[in-house]
């Protein structure tokens, strides 16, 4: 019995020694354990380089991979590497080399025996560079995305036509990235269904029904001989022409016109700056502001911002003007009516028009009344100037009269007064006329040069209005065809304007 146990012990020791030697010798080598496969391709007994070559030759997944990204009938083929998808064959080969080389010699021996007896298949992992994938999909989104197009209004031959909306689409980058990563992990698949969301327009054709009445119209005169100012008037009115303002939305004239820059087509023309006349790009836009302001008042709209000029203008009575400046004073109103409104603007040879179209149900009668109207004299000041010839007078600064006025709006419906409101009290400071005067004449008895009373200084570039030009034009009564009969302008809600510079584009309210 003792002899038998000794044999068993000796055999065990020899086996352990042999196993340890075998495992130790294998670990010192550079070959993969027998019985090991990668994605079903036998690589046992091969070095890492030999295994890589065999995988490249026999495993389809080792070849450059192309993923097909699909949305509806459209598709885009992209290399997996470009999408941040990396097949890590190097990691699979490293794992194959580790078989029999992990843990102590007992663990290594067990791994070697298990691989030889039962076989061991290793899968190739796929890794995704999320940052690269998202960047690639953001770039693809430029091709996939289609911005929605709001329904809009255009005027053709004096008639209002509604252009239907268009639904857009937008690539869901995050959801699409997850779909790409899922397909990339399955080496048997190559097609990815992109996740695209519908982008709905904010204004639909159904929102623009009911343009069947002229709510208000107002016009102001201008001097067409002032070519640069006239250019600015026509350019600016084209920018607000066919603008739709939905119920509850706000209209900003500054936003509609944009920056008054030469690069955007504006020309330099005289403008009031702190009561002085200065040439600036966009000179004349304040007349657009004034015309829009009066039309909005007559339509019963809620004015939320309006500023008076620093001095009276000639194309409307004091208290009825409005001024704007990019980055500063603005003209804003809210469509407080129940239906959308349409702003239409145009010019004739010497007048600027703004008409507001809306629904009959929103039509009201508006009176604009001025009270406490006062004209403030300009004043006169002489300054002695010994450098001038005796009796000589030179105007150093023109003077202009000031004014004060309170504007009241009365809103009626069917002849019944609904609202009476004091809108604002305006004060236009006068400016004294300053004259430099030479020494008194040396010869006695000679008459001195008579002083000349300074006239009211007009806004630059505007012809003095005839007595009725500053009065608001009342909204016309619609003809059976939906417009006012006017041989010179045609029929319909909107007249056919004379040709003007620029192209009228509809602008959604901001």
Image: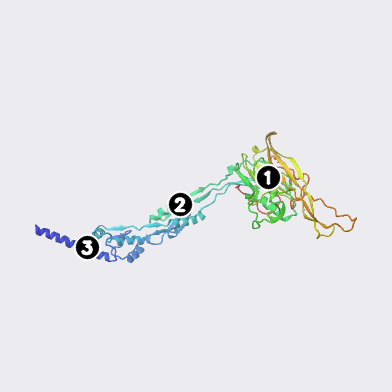
Say which element carries label 2. Answer: helix
In front of the other: 373 or 510: 373
Q: Report how far apart the C-alphas of labels 2 and 3 lie in the structure.
A: 53 Å
Q: Earlier in the sequence, mark 2 or mark 3?
A: 3
Dot in front, 1 or 2: 1
Question: Which residue position is annotated with label 1?
Answer: 293
Disc 3 packing (10 Å; few <14; some 14–19; many ≥20): some
Dot in front, 2 or 3: 3
Q: Report how far apart the C-alphas of labels 3 and 1 lie in the structure.
A: 99 Å
Q: Position of residue 272 (x, y in %)?
A: 71, 52
Res 84 visible: yes
Question: Which residue position is annotated with label 3?
Answer: 20
Q: Position of residue 494 (x, y in %)?
A: 68, 45
Which residue occupies 24% across, 65% down? 25
Which residue occupies 59% across, 42% down? 207
Q: Position of residue 337 (x, y in %)?
A: 63, 39
Disc 2 packing (10 Å; few <14; some 14–19; many ≥20): some
In front of the other: 195 or 451: 451
Question: Which residue position is annotated with label 2?
Answer: 174
User: Quick check: marks 3 and 1 in contact, CB under 8 Å?
Assistant: no
Examine the rendered structure and indicate whether residue 457 appears above or below residue 481: below
Q: Earlier in the sequence, mark 1 or mark 2?
A: 2
In front of the other: 145 or 26: 26
């Amino acid at each position: 019995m003792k002899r038998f146990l000794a044999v068993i012990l000796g055999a065990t020791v020899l086996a352990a020694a042999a196993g340890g030697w075998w495992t130790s010798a294998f670990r010192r080598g550079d070959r993969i354990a027998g019985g090991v496969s990668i994605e079903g391709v036998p690589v046992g007994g091969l070095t890492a380089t030999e295994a890589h070559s065999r995988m490249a030759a026999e495993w389809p997944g080792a070849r450059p991979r192309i993923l097909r990204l699909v949305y509806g009938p459209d598709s885009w083929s992209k290399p997996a590497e470009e999408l941040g998808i990396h097949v890590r064959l190097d990691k699979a080969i490293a794992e194959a080399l580790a078989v029999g080389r992990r843990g102590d010699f007992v663990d290594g021996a067990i791994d070697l025996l298990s691989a030889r007896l039962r076989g061991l298949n290793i899968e190739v992992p796929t890794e995704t560079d999320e940052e690269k994938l998202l960047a690639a999909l953001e770039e693809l989104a430029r091709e996939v995305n289609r911005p929605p197009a709001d329904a809009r209004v255009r005027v053709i031959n004096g008639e209002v036509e509604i252009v239907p909306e268009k639904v857009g689409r937008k690539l869901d980058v995050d959801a699409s990235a997850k779909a790409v990563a899922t397909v990339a992990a399955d080496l048997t698949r190559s097609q990815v269904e992109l996740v695209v969301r519908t982008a709905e327009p904010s204004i639909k054709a159904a929102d623009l029904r009911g343009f069947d009445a002229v709510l208000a119209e107002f016009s102001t005169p201008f001097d067409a001989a002032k070519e640069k100012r006239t250019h600015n008037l026509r350019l600016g009115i084209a920018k607000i022409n066919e603008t739709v303002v939905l119920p509850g939305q706000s209209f900003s004239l500054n936003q509609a016109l944009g920056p008054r820059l030469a690069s955007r087509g504006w020309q330099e023309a005289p403008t009031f700056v702190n009561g002085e006349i200065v040439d600036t790009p966009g000179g004349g836009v304040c007349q657009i502001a004034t015309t829009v302001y009066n039309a909005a008042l007559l339509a019963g709209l809620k004015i939320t911002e309006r500023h008076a000029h620093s001095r009276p203008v000639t194309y409307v009575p004091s208290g009825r003007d409005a001024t704007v400046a990019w980055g500063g004073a603005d003209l804003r109103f809210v469509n407080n009516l129940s239906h959308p409104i349409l702003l239409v603007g145009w010019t004739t040879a010497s007048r600027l028009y703004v008409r507001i179209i809306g629904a009959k149900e929103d039509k009201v009668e508006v009176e604009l009344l001025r009270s406490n109207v006062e004209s403030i004299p300009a004043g006169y000041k002489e300054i002695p100037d010994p450098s001038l010839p005796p009796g000589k007078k030179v105007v150093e600064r023109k003077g202009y009269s000031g004014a004060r006025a309170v504007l009241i709006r009365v809103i009626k419906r069917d002849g019944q007064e609904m609202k009476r409101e004091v809108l604002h009290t305006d004060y236009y400071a006068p400016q004294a006329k300053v004259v430099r005067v030479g020494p008194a004449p040396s010869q006695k008895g000679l008459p001195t040069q008579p002083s000349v009373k300074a006239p009211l200084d007009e806004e630059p570039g505007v012809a003095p209005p005839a007595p009725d030009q500053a009065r608001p034009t009342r909204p016309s009564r619609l003809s059976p065809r939906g417009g006012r009969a006017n041989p010179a302008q045609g029929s319909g809600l909107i007249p056919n304007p004379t040709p003007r510079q620029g192209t009228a584009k509809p602008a959604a309210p901001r």
